[in-house]
Structure formats: C-alpha cells, structure tokens
Image (tube, rainbow, N blue to C red):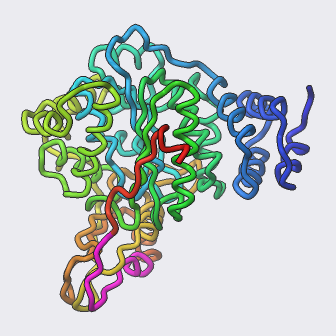
Amino acid sequence: MSFTAVELIIIKRDGGVLSEDAIRWLIAAYTNGDILDYQMSAMAMAILLNGLNAEELAVWTEAMLHSGAVFDFSDIAAAKVDKHSTGGVGDKISIPLAPLAASCGVVVPMISGRGLGHTGGTLDKLESIPGFTTHLDPAHFRSILTEHGLVLAGQSETMVPADRKLYALRDVSGTVPSIPLISSSIMSKKLAEGLDGLLLDVKTGLGASIHKLENSRELARTMVGIGTVHGVETVALITTMDQPLGHEVGNANEIKESVDVLRGEGPEDVTELTLAFGEIMLDLAGISGGRERLVEAIDSGEALQKLIDVTIAQGGDPSVIDDTSLLPTTEHEAVIEAPSDGYVTHCDALTIGIDTTLLGAGLTRKEDVIDPGVGITVHAKIGDPVSTGDPLATVRYSDESRWETHRDELASAWVIGEKQTLPRPLILETVTADSLDG
C-alpha cells in the first residue's frame, strides 16, 4: 500500500488510528530518508498529544525493532541482563551498576542513549573519559562482551536505526515525555540485544520526563508488558526524581561520582540504588549472593577493575579512573550560597537539569557540542540544614555569558524554609509481569 507522510500526520493529529501497514511504511520510510525530520517531528508531536493505542504501539515497537539488525548472543552461556533508566538529573546509576553486575557474573550488553531534554545521557558521560568510544560495530561489540561480560555502547548504524534517528529528533522537538515514544524507544533497543532479563528504572517527579506517578506507573506497566510478550523477564522499579541523584550533575563530574561508588565512597542515595538494582539483576540472571556478593565485589576492587578493563577495551584512558582529578573540567567556577538560615525544602531537579544543559553539558540543538567539564556539584539537598552563606552548589562553566544568563534561575532551584521536609523514598513501586493483572 502507498501512503504519504502528510496524510498519516493528519490522521494522528485528528485522533485517528494508524493501520498496521501505515505504521510499518512510516517507520521504513523515515529510516531510509523518504520522510524528513520536520515531518517526523510533526508525527511525534501528534503522538505526544493523542497517543497510540495498544495495537498501534505493538506494531510501532515491532517496526522499530526490525528496522535494522538484531543481536543473537545465544552462544554466550551466561544470562544476559541489562538495565535502562527513563532519565533523570544526576542519574549516573548505569555507570557503576553495569561493571558491578558484570563483576558478579552477569553478562551486560548495555546499549545506552544520549541526553534527552534536561536529563543527562550515559553515553555523553562515558565519552568524557578521553578516548572512550561508545560507537562500536557489531563485531567489536560482541568481541568486548565475550571477553569482559560487559560492553557500554550506543546503537550501531545498523541496530534499530529508526530509533537512533527518532531519539535525537525527540530531544530537540519537545516530544520527550510521550509514553508510547518512550516505551517503544527503550524496548526496541533492549529487545534487539538478545536479553534474558531486563531491569527498568522508571523515574517519576519534577526532574523526570514523566512527572506524575500515575503516568510513570502506566509507562512501567507498558514496558513490562512489551518485554513479557517478547519472552524477556522484565522488572520495573518506579523511583523518585524530585531532586538530583547524588551530588554531581553533568558529565565528567558524574563519572567521578560513579567511580566513588565503585570505591565504596559514593553518596548514600546513588549507592543504595546501585545495590538495589544490582540485586535484581543478579536475581534475573539466576546468580545467588544478592547484596552481600555485590558489596564484596566493591570491597575487593573487582567492580572497579571491571570498569577499568572495559574502559581500556573501548579505547578510553584508564588513568582518569585511577585519578579522577584528570577528568575534563572548566576554566570558571562559581558558588551559589544560601540566602538565609533554615532547611532545604526544595531542590528542583528540573531547574538544575535545564540550566546544566544550557550551560553546555547537554544539547539544545542537534548541531551543539557538549562541554564535558561543565557541571554542578549539589552541596545541599532536601532536609539539609543550612546557614546564611553556606554553599548550596558549586557551578563549573566555560561561557561567562551563559552563566550570567542563567545564574539567577539556577539559584531559584533551592528553597529554604523554617521547618524540615524529608524527601520521598528512593523506590516507590515495583512492577513485574505478575503484577500486571492487579
């Protein structure tokens, strides 16, 4: 059947349903360049506003999945388990988690993404390690995975190319917070990895792509359902993203904090999520020992050595892991100070994420170049007592004019009150296949 991009955009714009043939044609035409970015941007916006029903989403995900090559790792005997986050501010969990799980015997073929909107990307952070390449052809990907049980990479040119194009487009077209687009993007990549198990971290709160708990729950259930239908045991945790995770927001500085976790010196919230997620990944892989085994891998140095080994295998300079002060930084630094005595009642992850991006740590256009040294160190978070003049954050930036433009807005991210407010729990809910009928 023959279609045009405009007629399909109009159907979805007006709340209609796209046929299976129409969806398959649309994804194929966009992948091969017959549909242009501005047309797909319009379709993405129509989907954000009007959604996809269950049948449309199933076909859309399948079409994305089969737009390119699919991995087959059945020759690797150990269980293949990956983890993916829907994105948050300061969310570097994948970077310490993947080598930690791999050091305990889980095979982790981790395919990650770049920053979306105000949320940072695992690939952008890894590439702040000098020489580290996340662009691997399938043969190199397989070779590293076979030798080390871990690879930290992005999509190849041939793996789910439809998603690779659409992912970048959503970032600059205001269409990130769409449950159908998020779920099909994540699951098409993950299903292409040939996994036995999958852990999903679905963020909820002001700093997440999805702000409301009920919508995050819908996203978690949607993705667990997609994984289950495709024979991949999938578990989703709904986690809080009201304030940044850890103390570091950026790229190179988040690598430093990730290394701190693997040295047993990381901040409490990042360490706790890393261990909680690690327990689930070991369980999905059928590996016993749980948290005790994970802590042992950190204490013995096995987990950190796994990160060093994979960094070398992917062309990175391991000296910056041994000495994180060698990671990229910036020429300028400024401190945001507490305006009064009291307690931090609000530490706005959204504002912090947006301004970190605008200072140069992320993209506002596809043509932008990320400055890996730009970042914010958060000194005070919700519930912390502060006195007038205490540092709330240290900001590292390269462009003076950008800092002058955003300094007041960034300072507004912290609210100081008289009464202490405690943050929400890190983990709010767990969604499994068994819970879908509940």
| Residue farthest left in this picture | 300
The image quadrant that residue 187 belongs to is top right
Does residue 426 appear left or right of residue 49 in this picture?
A: left
Residue 249 place in picture, x, y as percent:
34, 59
Q: Position of residue 203 (x, y in %)?
A: 44, 55
Residue 77 point in image, percent of width and height: 34, 11
Relative height, residue 74 to residue 331 (above, below): above
Q: Residue at x 42, y 56 (%)?
A: 88
> x, y (%) of residue 181?
63, 45
Inspect the magenta stretch and tell me whether residue 418 lies in it. yes
* Apparent side of residue 158 relative to residue 50 in the rendered image (left or right): left
Q: Residue at x 68, y 34 (%)?
A: 58
The segment highlighted magenta reads: 408-423
Residue 109 higher or lower than 115, as above or below = above
Relative height, residue 340 to residue 154 (above, below) = below
Q: Is residue 389 above or below residue 24?
A: below
Using the rendered view, name the quadrant where residue 101 is placed: top left
Give yes or no for residue 256 being in the magenta stretch: no
Looking at the image, which residue is at 58% across and 39% down?
185
Quadrant including the N terminus: top right
